[in-house]
Image: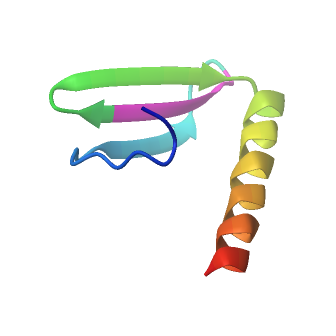
Amino acid sequence: MGINTERDIEANLQIGPTDQGMVRLFIEADGLEIPMDFSPEEAEDIASEIMAAVKAAQAKG
C-alpha cells in the first residue's frame, strides 16, 4: 500500500480553524472520523507540500 495504490473508498474532507487557534483537517470515511489538528505554521507547511504536489502532477499531465 502506498501513495500510488488506488482504493475504492469515498471520504469527506473538511478543513477549518478550531476555537483553540489550530487548523483542523477532518476526514470521515466508512463511519470512521479522523480529526487532525495542526498549528498554523504546520498547516502552512502542509499547504506548501500540497502546492508542490499540484505542480508536479500538472507537469505530468
Q: Which residues are magenta?
A: 21-27
> Main SS type for the magenta part?
strand
Count of marks placed on residues:
0
Quarter holding the C terminus?
Answer: bottom right
51 vs 60, nearest the viewer: 60
Residue 59 is left or right of residue 41, and the answer is left
Residue at position x 41%, y 45% in the image: 5
Image point (52%, 22%), residue name: 36
Q: In the figure, residue 41 lies in which quadrant?
A: top right
Image location (x, y in percent) of residue 22:
66, 25
Q: Position of residue 51 (x, y in %)?
A: 74, 59
**Residue depicted at x 80% and y 41%:** 44
Q: Nearer the viewer, residue 42 or 50?
A: 50
Q: Residue furthest bottom?
A: 61
Which residue is rendered at x = 51% and y = 34% of the image? 25
Residue 35 quadrant:
top left
- Quadrant assignment, res 21: top right
- In this orientation, which residue lies closer to the viewer: 15 or 21? 15
Please name the colour scheme applied to the rendered image.
rainbow
The N terminus appears in which quarter of the rendering? top left
Q: Residue furthest top?
A: 20
Image position, residue 50 (x, y; %): 69, 52
Residue 23 located left or right of residue 26: right
Asked if 17 appears above or below 32 in the picture, the reply is: below
Magenta highlight on residue 23: yes
